Amino acid sequence: MADRPHQLQVHPQRGHYEGGVKNQRGSGPSAGKVMAVLAALPVGGTLLAIAGLTLAGSVIGLLVTTPLFIIFSPVLVPAAIVVGLAVVGFLSSGALGLTGLSSLSWVLNYLRCASQSLPREMDHARRRMQDIAAFVGQKTREVGQEIQSKAQEGRRT
């Protein structure tokens, strides 16, 4: 790959540059672009005017209601605090209720699964207890025999 010569392709450009700006013959926006601008201009202007009117109305409303908020603030602030605490109380109550329900659901599901596997576990535990009892019995016999043998050796000496 390193030995292969690089190829350069040159594409002719239409038009010529005058003062850093490309000047094409017959250039200009297409008819579709012109129609789109003509259709969007009144719609954009109308929306901009509505946005300005909305901003002006909001400012006027704020100027009118600010003195009322200041006058009634001893009543409004505690009322807003009470309403906020009530909303927080209802939301936390709902969250705790959902947590309790999901906990109960988990416990019931766990008990249901445990009750299905309980007979198997009881059989396994019974077998282990029988094995342990047999092992303890065997060890007891062995220890008893060992004690008897030592007692007999003690009598002989």
Image (cartoon, rainbow, N blue to C red):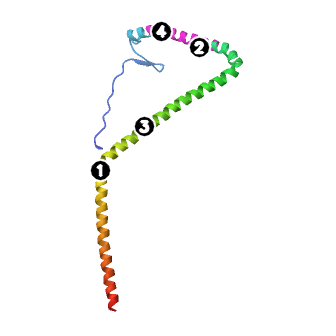
Q: CA distance from mark 4 to mark 2?
A: 18 Å
Q: Which span is picked out in magenta?
A: 38-60
Q: Position of residue 107 (x, y in %)?
A: 40, 42
Kind of residue at badge 3: Ser
Residue pointed to by mark 1: 119
The quadrant in which residue 54 appears is top right
Could you tell which of marks 1 and 4 lies nearer the N-terminus? 4
Q: In the image shown, does 79 or 64 lie closer to the viewer? A: 79
- Farthest front residue? 155
Contact (CB < 8 A) between labels 3 and 1? no
Residue pointed to by mark 2: 55
Could you tell which of marks 3 and 1 lies nearer the N-terminus? 3
Kind of residue at badge 1: Pro
Q: Residue at x 52, y 30 (%)?
A: 91
Quadrant for the N terminus, please. Answer: top left
Could you tell which of marks 2 and 1 lies nearer the N-terminus? 2
Q: How many labels were placed on the picture?
A: 4
- Farthest right residue? 71
Residue pointed to by mark 3: 102
Q: On screen, 129 above or below 152?
A: above
Q: Residues within 10 Å of mark 4 (few under 14, many from 20)?
A: few
Q: Position of residue 41 (x, y in %)?
A: 48, 9
Residue pointed to by mark 4: 43
Q: On screen, 64 above or below 95?
A: above
